[in-house]
Amino acid sequence: MAISGRARELRSEGRDVISFGAGEPDFPTPEHIVAAAARAAHDPANHKYSANQGLPPVRAAIAAYTKDFSGIDVDPTQVVVTNGAKQAVFQSFAALVDEGDEVLLPSPYWVTYPAGIELAGGKAVTIPTTPESGFKVSVDELEAARSDRTVALVFVSPSNPTGAVYDADEAREIGEWARDNQIWVIADEIYQRLVYDGSDVAASIVSSTSRFENWIVVNGVAKSFAMTGWRVGWMIGPEDIMAAAARLQSHATSNVANICQQAALAALRGPQETVDEMREAFDSRRKLMYEMIGDIPGVSCVEPLGAFYVFPDVREILTDEVPTTARLGEALIEEAGVAVVPGESFGAPGFIRLSYALGEPDIERGITRIGEMIASL
Ligand SMILES: Cc1ncc(COP(=O)(O)O)c(C=O)c1O
C-alpha cells in the first residue's frame, strides 16, 4: 500500500510510473454483481443491522461454494462472514492463540500474518523456504520448527508473494503431520481459483487430508471476483471456534455491510465465467512477465503457478551502492518510474514482488525499464 501510495504521488506530479505493486485485480467487479448491490441498496431490509455471523442465505451460499471449490462438507452454522479475509485471519489467531503460543509461518509470507499472530500475543516462528524447493515447506522443516508451544500452522496456497501452489499430495502430507501433532491449520484459500497449472482450482489441504478436524479455512470474494474494495470474506471451522470468533466480531464490527453481502451472494451463486476470463488474462500476462524477467542477466525466477505475482531473486545484482532490495525498490521508483515491492516486506530480502495485475503493454514497458536499470548498476 505504501508503494502504491508513492506511485500515485509521483503520478500526480506528472511522472509516468508503472506500478507492479498492486495486490488486487485491475478488472472492475463483474456487472451482474454490481447490479445485485444496486438492487440491494434499494431494499430497506438491507438498511438495518443484521445477524453478526452473516446473512443466512450468504452463509448457505458460502457453504455450497466451499463444497464446490474446496471439496469440504460444511454446515452454514460453521461459517462467519467477515470484513474481508483480513478480519478472518485476525479472528482466527484471536480464537486460537494464547500468550506465548507459537504459530508456524512459512516465509516468504503475506505481511498481515506475523502482525495477526503478534496481536493475539503469539510468536510467529518463521520457516524460510527457497527457490530450490519452489518456495514450499516440507514436513521435515515443519517438524524441526515444532515445539511444545506450537498451536498452529499458516498454510497459504496459492501463495502471496511467491505464487507457489502445493499439489494435493504435498498438501495431504502436511495436513496429516498437523493432524497427528494436533496442530491447527489456518488454510488461506483466497487465491484458490487463480491457478495456471491446467486445473481450475488449487487443492485444499482440508479436503486432501482424511480424519482432519483442526482447521480453519479463510477465503473471500476479493481476488476471484475482483471485489477487494467490497470487503467480504469468511472463516469456516469447528463450531466452538467459530462461536469464539463471532463473539469477538460482535463487539468489534458486527455484521458485514448488507449490500456488500448481497453482492457477494450474487458472485457466489451467479455465472462463474468472469472468473475464468480473468484467470486467462492473468495467465497470459504471467507468461509474458516470467519470460521477460528470465531474460534479465543476474535475475532468476521460479515459475509462479498461482495468484498474480512473480517473485524474482535479485541477490546477484545487488551492489555496494544498491545493497538491499529495499534500496533497489526506492531506486526503481525514483529513477526508473517503476514500483515493485521489496522482499523485506515478506521476510525475504533479496527478492522483489511484481504483480501482474496490469495490462500487457505496461508489463512490457515496465520490465524493460527494470532490465535497463539493473544493467546500469
Ligand atoms: C494471502 C492473502 N490472504 C488474505 C488477503 C486479504 O483479503 P481481503 O481483501 O479479503 O481482506 C490477501 C490480500 O492481499 C492475501 O494476499
Image: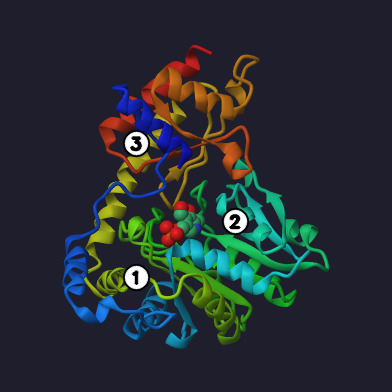
Please, which residue is most extreme toward the top here?
376
> Residue 116 versus residue 157: which sits nearer the camera?
116
Q: From the image, tell me which residue sits under label 1.
A: 257
Query: Would residue 106 appear left or right of 266 to someone viewing this image?
Result: right
* Amino acid of disc 3: Leu
List x then y, in percent, for residue 305: 45, 50
**Residue 296 seen in render:** no
Q: From the image, tell me which residue sits under label 3.
A: 288
Do the residues bearing badges 1 and 2 touch, measured as CB atoms within 8 Å?
A: no
Please, which residue is most extreme toward the right here?
148
Residue 135: assigned label: none
Q: Quadrant of residue 81?
A: bottom left
138 shown above or below 364:
below
Per the image, label 2 sits on a secondary structure element best described as helix
Report how far apart the C-alphas of labels 1 and 2 lie in the structure: 25 Å
* Amino acid of disc 1: Ala
Residue at 30% x, 79% y is 48
Sequence-wise first label, 1 or 2: 2
Q: From the image, tell me which residue sits under label 2.
A: 113
Q: Which corner quadrant holds the N terminus?
A: top left
Q: Is mark 3 within 8 Å of ligand 1?
A: no
Query: Would residue 279 appear left or right of 36 to someone viewing this image?
Result: right
203 shown above or below 125:
below
State which mark lies toward you, 1 or 2: 1
Residue at 53% x, 31% y is 300
344 shown above or below 198:
above
For label 3, the crowd category at 10 Å Cα-Cα, with few meaning under 14, some 14 to 19 and many 20 or more, is some
* Amino acid of disc 2: Tyr
State which mark lies toward you, 3 or 2: 2
Q: Is mark 2 within 8 Å of ligand 1?
A: yes
